[in-house]
Image (tube, rainbow, N blue to C red):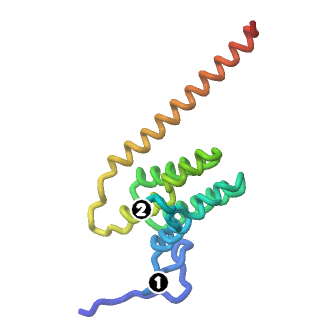
Amino acid sequence: MPHQVVTTPPGARTRGLPVSRPGSPSVVELLDRVSMVMDRLVPIPGTRLRAGVNTLLLLLPVAGDALATLVSLGILLIGLSSRRVPRIVAARMVLNSLLDASLGWIPVLGTLFDLFFKADTRNVRLLQEYAGRGETPAPSTGGHWLFVLGVLALFALVLALLALGVVALALWILRGTP
């Protein structure tokens, strides 16, 4: 019995995303290209590091941060809407983008963090690792659980320290200064 190929008409869409035609790149390949431009476009001479448009955008106060965050959000939304991954992997991808976006707003430190962390590339690699595996068993998610729980614990610690600081400041103000 011959193998039957099901094709879609040109321009057909699936869940809001274009259907890839034979020879055209898949959604994950396109996201990988975007992450390459954003995170690893050019090598930094004398180092093993690479920088992309994201690093340059973060040098522009506010507007650059917002634009880089929007591109990261787009990669995240398109990737998660077009591919199924375990929930914990999706949570890790969201945390990667949140860390990148929130720390990116800190002058100098955010740019350095972005140069090393590369959230867009990490998210695309997670999509490549977990999506479209067919019958092949997915890799372990234990490390992702540790990452997510660790970030949440760090976030809780920062909130607790902020609350403690607010209470200490309020007590200092109420007691008056000597």
Where does the image place residue 88, in percent across and percent down from the top left? 41, 50
For mark 2, what is the residue? 125
Q: What residue is at 46 percent from the left and 79 percent from the top? A: 25
The residue pinned by badge 1 equals 24
* Kind of residue at badge 2: Arg
**Which quadrant is home to the N terminus?**
bottom left
Tag shown at residue 84 = none
Q: Position of residue 146 (x, y in %)?
A: 37, 42
Element assignment for label 2 = helix
Of the numbered discs 2 and 1, the one sitting upstream in the chain is: 1
In percent of width and height, residue 35 lies at: 51, 65
Label 2, label 1: how far apart the Cα atoms are:
20 Å
Residue at 75% x, 10% y is: 177
Callout 2–callout 1 Cβ contact below 8 Å: no
Vertical position of residue 11 compared to residue 130: above or below: below
Camera-near label (2 vs 1) is 2
Residue situated furthest bottom in the rendering = 2
